[in-house]
Image (cartoon, helix red, strand yellow):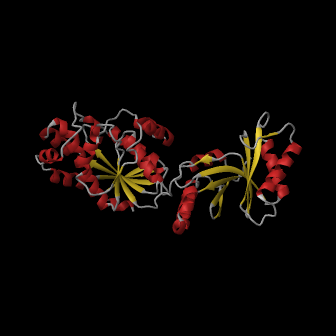
């Protein structure tokens, strides 16, 4: 039975002056995520972090580790003192518990403790001889083995493992500032949110609700999606701003020509997102736009829509194929929620022939037919704020300051 999980940081090793801060952050995230396993304890040694299982099911711990940004990979390992006889014995124990019949193997040694009295090659040869001596019909293949016995010799002990699992990678959660995520109930925007969380950003979210055209179930779908995202965040919380968008949509579709409806609607959304982001001290806006996927995502449309804000817009999915986005949705656990049949405000009013090459001068002229500044101010003053947590509870709060 494996007694430790060895965690590797990967990209954090490049951070130099900020390395310790980043490592401390990801270690805190690991400890927070594993609080539900009271027997698990921890050890840290600079660029390595160990979860000591103390009888806890390794699979349950691994499932949590897969959702923590900043982890490059991790391995279930067995540990012994850095003594060659103990290392040999443990390597034999590891291989003996595997299905090694008709399979090839090799030993690969990393001698991180340079004071250890043998070189990596000498350790590898000594372990290999011991395995051949004690296991019949064992076959070696140093180029393409079926099984690799990895030996990591370090000052704090020696660790033996056969497999590694890739983590999320990226940077520790909530280390690079705040972003405002524009989220619908579809597949793309929630994936964009997880992608920026992986890059170290904290997020709040903004959603545009248009009752009675959109139902309570459409909002519930957004809540369910964001609760998945909380599992990837260090503090396991997200503040959602629900914008009452009905009056703005009614004004657009009663006063503006049909083919420009989506263009004007998206310009209004960006105006609101910028104001809310600035109020919440978010540095960027994030959305799930994908170039060319729909009419509002042609280059001409993006240019005209984007004109209303000077805030940087991050589009993590901009160049991905749809199948790649869907694969990510399956991986992150959001796909089944996103495909629930509850429409959001972006899909309820889609015209038959939306403008794919809108002109800025036309868009400005059309939107001046409505008193949009007053409508935007009214919508912002009536925003509902919802605190979401990873335990699937949520709380409506009066003032967003109550979140902090």
Q: Position of residue 385 (x, y in %)?
A: 33, 53
As drawn, the residue found furthest toward the left would be: 369
Instruction: Judge from the rendering whether residue 160 lies leftward or rightward of residue 74; answer left or right.
Output: right
As drawn, the residue found furthest toward the top would be: 352
Q: Position of residue 170 (x, y in %)?
A: 51, 54
Location of residue 337 (image quadrant): top left
Instruction: Judge from the rendering whether residue 243 lies leftward or rightward of residue 330; answer left or right.
Output: left
Q: Nearer the viewer, residue 2 or 126?
A: 126
As drawn, the residue found furthest toward the right would be: 133
Q: Residue at x 53, y 62 (%)?
A: 25
As drawn, the residue found furthest toward the front would be: 143
Q: Residue at x 22, y 42 (%)?
A: 263
Q: Position of residue 162 (x, y in %)?
A: 71, 46
Tell me if residue 123 can be seen.
yes
Instruction: Judge from the rendering whether residue 20 lies leftward or rightward of residue 132; answer left or right.
Output: left
Q: Nearer the viewer, residue 50 or 312?
A: 312
Q: Residue at x 79, y 49 (%)?
A: 91
* 48 to 324, vertically: above or below: below
Q: Residue at x 89, y 45 (%)?
A: 133
| The C terminus lies in quadrant | bottom left
């Amino acid at each position: 039975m494996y007694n430790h999980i060895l965690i590797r940081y990967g990209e954090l090793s490049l951070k130099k002056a900020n390395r310790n801060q980043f490592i401390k952050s990801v270690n805190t995230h690991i400890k927070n995520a594993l609080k539900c396993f009271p027997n698990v304890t921890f050890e840290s040694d600079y660029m390595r972090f160990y979860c000591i299982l103390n009888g806890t099911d390794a699979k349950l711990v691994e499932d949590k580790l897969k959702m923590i940004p900043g982890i490059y990979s991790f391995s279930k390992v067995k540990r012994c003192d850095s003594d060659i006889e103990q290392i040999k014995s443990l390597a034999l124990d590891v291989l003996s518990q595997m299905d090694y019949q008709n399979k090839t193997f090799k030993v690969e040694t990393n001698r991180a403790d340079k004071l250890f009295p043998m070189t990596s090659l000498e350790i590898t040869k000594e372990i290999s001889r011991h395995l051949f001596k004690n296991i019949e019909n064992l076959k070696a293949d140093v180029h393409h083995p079926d099984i690799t016995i990895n030996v990591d010799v370090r000052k704090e002990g020696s660790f033996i493992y056969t497999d590694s699992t890739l983590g999320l990678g990226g940077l520790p959660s909530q280390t690079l500032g705040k972003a405002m995520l524009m989220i619908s109930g579809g597949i793309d925007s929630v994936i964009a949110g997880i992608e920026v969380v992986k890059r170290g950003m904290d997020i709040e979210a903004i959603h545009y609700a248009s009752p009675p055209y959109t139902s309570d179930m459409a909002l519930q779908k957004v809540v369910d999606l964001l609760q998945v995202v909380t599992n990837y965040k260090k503090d396991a919380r997200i503040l959602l701003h629900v914008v009452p968008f009905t009056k703005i949509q009614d004004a657009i579709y009663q006063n503006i020509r049909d083919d420009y409806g989506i263009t004007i609607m998206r310009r209004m959304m960006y105006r609101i997102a910028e104001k809310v982001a600035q109020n919440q001290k978010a540095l960027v806006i994030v959305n799930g736009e994908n170039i060319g996927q729909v009419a509002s995502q042609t280059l001409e449309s993006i240019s005209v829509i984007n004109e209303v804000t000077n805030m940087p817009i991050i589009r993590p999915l901009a160049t991905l194929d749809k199948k790649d986005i869907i694969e990510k949705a399956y991986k992150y656990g959001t796909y089944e929620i996103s495909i629930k049949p509850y429409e959001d405000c972006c899909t309820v009013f889609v015209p038959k022939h939306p403008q794919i090459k809108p002109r800025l001068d036309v868009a400005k002229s059309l939107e001046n037919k409505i008193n949009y500044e007053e409508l935007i101010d009214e919508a912002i003053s009536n925003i509902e704020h919802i605190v979401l947590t990873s335990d699937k509870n949520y709380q409506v709060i009066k003032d967003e300051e109550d979140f902090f």
